[in-house]
Amino acid sequence: MRRDLYQELLIVSEELLQHCREANWEQDEAQKQLLEIIDRRQKIIDQIAELNQAPLTDDEQEIIKQILILDQESARLTEAAKVGFVQKINKVQKGKRTTKAYSPDTVQTEGYFIDQKK
């Protein structure tokens, strides 16, 4: 039972890595799919935690090592995507500041002055 859960976790981790490699992070759908995969993964982890925690077999330890390798690669890819987003946001903000700095404020050429003193 526990080995099956570890095997399922390995499959979901492979799916997560594949998604991280192929996702177009600028699309909302890719982000939603990432969250769905992470939710499924967390449910499996919770199921494993609920089971009796007998010592791990060699086979289970090997599966866990594979999962850790996949998770590290997924984390590296998502971190790279995050850095790319931060750079794009900074570029947009810099462009807005530049536009604001070089675009003159509208000058009012006509107007009325109303004297409040009587």
Image: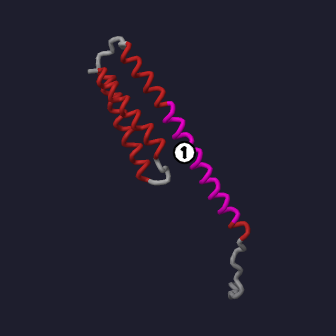
Q: Nearer the viewer, residue 93 or 38?
A: 38
> Residue 53 vs residue 104: left or right?
left
- Where on the picture, by quarter, is residue 16? top left
Q: Can you give x and y, in whole percent of width and height, for residue 75 in the image?
A: 51, 35
Identify the secondary structure beneath mark 1: helix
User: Within the magenta stretch, is there residue 3?
Assistant: no
- Where on the picture, by quarter, is residue 37? top left
Q: Quadrant of the N terminus?
A: top left
- Which residue, as the protein is rendered here, is positioned at the far left? 1
- Where on the picture, by quarter, is residue 113? bottom right
Q: Is residue 8 above or below residue 82?
A: above
Q: Amino acid at mark 1?
A: Ala
Q: Quadrant of the C terminus?
A: bottom right
> Residue 68 vs residue 112: left or right?
left
Q: Can you give x and y, in whole percent of width and height, for residue 89 in the image?
A: 60, 54
Q: Main secondary structure of the magenta part?
A: helix
> Residue 73 vs residue 42: left or right?
right
- Which residue, as the protein is rendered here, is positioned at the far top? 55
Q: Can you give x and y, in whole percent of width and height, for residue 17 in the image?
A: 45, 37
Which residue is disc 1 drawn over? Answer: 81
* Residue drawn where x is 46% and y is 26% of the image: 68
User: Within the magenta stretch, is there residue 90?
Assistant: yes
* Residue drawn where x is 40% and y is 33% of the image: 13
* Residue drawn where x is 36% and y is 38% of the image: 39
Q: How many marks?
A: 1
**Circle 1 Cα neighbour tier, 10 Å, few/some/many (<14 / 14–19 / ≥20):** some
Q: Which residues are magenta?
A: 72-98
Q: Is residue 1 above or below residue 70?
A: above
